[in-house]
Image (cartoon, rainbow, N blue to C red):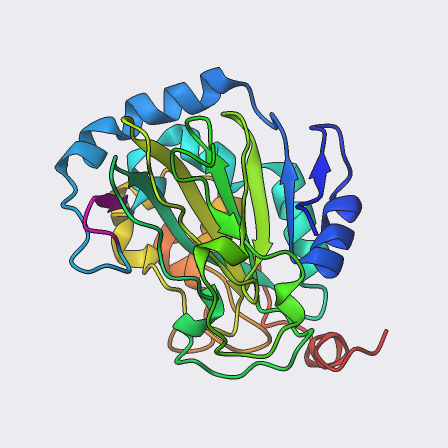
Amino acid sequence: MSVPRFAADCTPEAVAAALAEQGCAIVERLVEPGVMARAQAELQPWLDATPTGPDAFAGRRTRRTGGLIARSATCRELVTHPLVLDAVRATLPHATSFQLHLTQGIAIGAGEPAQAIHRDQWAFDFFPFPTGYEVQCNTIWAMTDFSARNGATRVLPGSHRFADKLSFREADTEPAEMPAGSVLFYTGSLYHGGGANRSESTRIGVNLTYAVSWLRQEENQYLSVPFEIARTLPEPLLRLMGYARGAYALGYVDDLRDPLEVLLGRPTGEGFGDLAVAARRATGRS
């Protein structure tokens, strides 16, 4: 099976359907290469200052730079791209809400071996989520062209329905080749990994992932984004970052206050939520 591919004018429903069927999908040239070049210019000083990984999984020739909300205005645009958010929403319809899980620039250097094939949802203490119950919808944006030679992400289409904790080799997967400005969608249950970089250049991608709001975020957005920057950001982005209640009653502050009210120092008008609505969504009843 190959990775489903779409043009930039596709619908979020089409992307979500491909994710349900294959666990992955590519939308080609969703933004102009110039957008990614702008993001790279904003992030390059941070990428250069980031140490390479401490082990083989992180990549000893790979730099993983987080905190992208604070460090790149362009990455904020990618995080909130309408097609992405609508596709995530359509992929995780069983959840009351979802939130930003991590932001990471991944620069795979020349000579880096292939990463171990894995599932991103293993980050949740290897909990065996039921097959078909997705808790993550992830994206990797191509900042530079992705090719089989330079370390394009390797995916195993259809593996989101496989048993858990299986082992695969690079040869079992296919490269998600795509031009700069394209984006790879994949679920948290898909077996995948960074490809080996057999070129002389660095492959750079922007990994922006989303998860249901009742799971802990991999990247702590409250500390990754200083308060003085957070207070300048638009409210929808702040809520996506986690300044909102997850599910029905997760994440409130002291006397049932909205976390955004605490951050901004003013009332937001947000109520506590509707338990009946949350219960219907969580149990799959309309």
- Residue pictured at 53% horizontal, 84% vertical: 128
Q: Is residue 268 visible?
A: no
Q: Quadrant of the C terminus?
A: bottom right
Magenta segment boundaries in residue numbering: 59-65
- Residue pictured at 71% horizontal, 70% vertical: 94
Q: Is residue 286 left or right of residue 76?
A: right
**Residue 157 image-quadrant placement:** bottom right
Residue 149: image x %, image y %?
41, 34
**Nearest to the observer: residue 110 or residue 50:** 110
Residue 9: image x %, image y %?
75, 28
**Residue 97 image-quadrant placement:** bottom right
**Residue 45 image-quadrant placement:** top left
Q: Is residue 17 left or right of residue 194?
A: right
64 in the magenta segment? yes
Residue 24: image x %, image y %?
63, 52
Q: Is residue 283 left or right of residue 238?
A: right
- How many labels, in total? 0
Residue 98: image x %, image y %?
57, 61
Residue 180 position (above or below residue 220): above
